[in-house]
Amino acid sequence: MQHPSVGRIVHYQSYGTPGGEYKSEPRAAIITQVHNATCVDLCVLNPTGMFFNLNVVQGQEGGKWDWPPRV
């Protein structure tokens, strides 16, 4: 089992828009602080810039983070 740590790269699932103009997509994110095994602070890297998101919980839905798939 993987454990989050500062500096690790994860996927942040964007919300998308309610009307569907923009889909929910995975974005690269860097863990900036670890609160526990499933809650972290992130610096999310978007094509148009970056933003900081606090207290993000792990999951597959929009607004959550998860480990990138191994390829």
Image: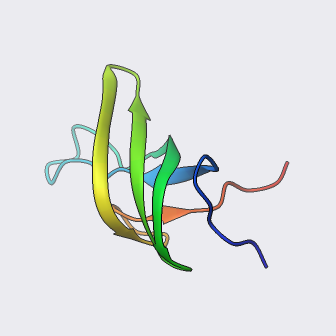
Residue 39, by quadrant, is: bottom left
Residue 17, x across and y down, in percent: 19, 48
Rendered-image quadrant of the N terminus? bottom right
The residue at the point 36 percent across, 66 percent down is: 56
Residue reaching furthest to the top: 48
19 or 69: which is nearer to us? 69
- The residue lying furthest to the right in this view is 71
x, y percent for residue 51: 29, 37
User: How many dots with numbers?
Assistant: 0
Residue at image location 40% in from the left, 41% down from the top: 44
Looking at the image, is 58 positioned above or below residue 41? below
Task: Identify the residue shown where x is 62% and y is 61%.
Answer: 5
Horizontal side of 60 relative to 52 (left or right) equals: right
Q: Nearer the viewer, residue 26 or 43?
A: 43
Eyeballing the image, is 45 above or below 37?
Answer: above
Residue furthest out toward the left: 19
Where residue 41 appears, x then y in whole percent? 39, 58
At x 62% / y 66%, what residue is drawn?
4
Residue 49, position in %: x, y? Answer: 32, 22
* Type of colouring: rainbow
